[in-house]
Image (cartoon, helix red, strand yellow):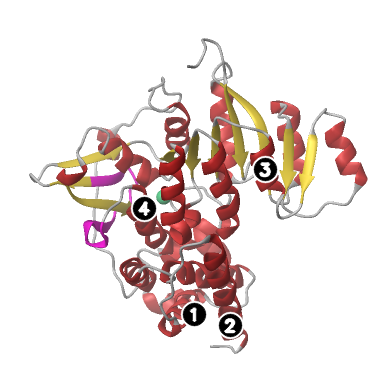
Amino acid sequence: MMMVGERQKVIILGSTGSIGQMTLEVIQQFPDQFEIVGLAAGSNASLLLEQAITFRPKAVSLYREEKSSTLHKEFSSLGLKLLTGPEAADKLVEEFKADIVVAAIPGIESLKPTLIAVRQAKRVALASKEALVVAGNLIMEEAKRRGTEIIPVDSEHCGVFQCLRKEKKEDISRVILTASGGPFFETPIAELAYKSVEEALAHPRWKMGKKITIDSATMMNKGLELIEARWLFDLKPQQLAVLVHPQSIVHSLVELIDGSVLAQLSVTDMRLPIQFALCYPKRVTRFLPSLNLSEIRRLEFFEVDEERFPLIRLAFQALEKGGSFPVALNAANEVAVSSFIEGKIAFPEISKIVKAVMDEHDFRPAETLEEILEIDRETREKTIKLINLGL
Ligand code: MG
């Protein structure tokens, strides 16, 4: 039983990223309900220090190795411990018990700490979609066994979660995730080869981290979200669909067997799903602007053009094949996206490379953490080789 006045202890994995920073903003609105006990960052030590000064956690961690004793001293002068290295976030979650862990590390790096969080915390507010894409079964089984709540922070999944709160599983006919279409929704396909990293990073609706923004431009983000939804809501691949909705007001739709369609709408602001995941099942008064539909006036929906966005089809295929396919898909995509950001390949090559890797991939089971990490490692190697060959 929670005592009146007792605050929920929160650890944020990925505190210096976009979701992490917004989570801290939300927590600042509810100082009597939440208390930050740990913050895990990747490499941004100066922002982590600023956050630590404001929120006074018990410990912080950096993914990068940090030998500099001045940095360690700066943190210890605040009375807190600095853990460093690739396993630092794992240790943070293990040592400093939290009620809620917000998992917001991008990429497969999120897998281990998220899995540990599922074992340790009462609730995981999950933004790290890649963790579910590669290890959905493992994470959901573990959550069931431990009685851990997994509340999605992804806006589409938060919408589905809200639509399904009072519905029976057998009454769900289809779940439709909406996609903004990203910056290249209307760009002539022939021009995509000349699109720069800056142009791909200029997302029309959402302000997010680099990896997810490029994934939105290729629509792989929606592909990953399909796989994420399959695990979160225990759906069959044929129950999942995507519609392009450039206004990003309707976050998802749930069609029930009687033909009713439920939808969740809100202003385009990630602080809402974050707040929902932290406060659930309580509804708290918004600090966001109200949704004014008469001002927006038009809500449009389009089918996905798979010629323009071939990764969507690959994601559907990986979802249907299961096993090692989603792991390989994610690994090839992570490598291809980094290569694009580093200027090594052109934009359309992201999907070409991922397709080439997937065409060669053979099914293997991917049930344990070791199997998953091994498939991930092998696929990364293959993808790097293909890129270096100048496919
Ligand atoms: Mg999303």
Q: Residue at x 56, y 59 (%)?
A: 108
Spot occupied by residue 19 in the image (x, y as percentages of width and height)? 55, 42
Chain-order first, disc 2 or disc 3: 3
Instruction: Kindly give the residue lying farthest to the top in the view shown.
Output: 4
**Structural distance between the alpha carbons of marks 2 and 3:** 32 Å
Q: Residue 387, labelled with which disc?
A: 2
Task: Check disc 1 and report the residue beneath it.
Answer: 353
Q: Residue 231, labelled with which disc?
A: 4
**Residue 326 figure quarter:** bottom left
Q: Secondary structure at mark 4?
A: helix
Looking at the rendered structure, the kind of residue marked 3 is Ala
**Front position among marks 2 and 4:** 4
Q: How many marks?
A: 4
Q: Secondary structure at mark 1?
A: helix
Task: Check disc 3 and report the residue beneath it.
Answer: 40
Q: Which residues are magenta?
A: 236-253
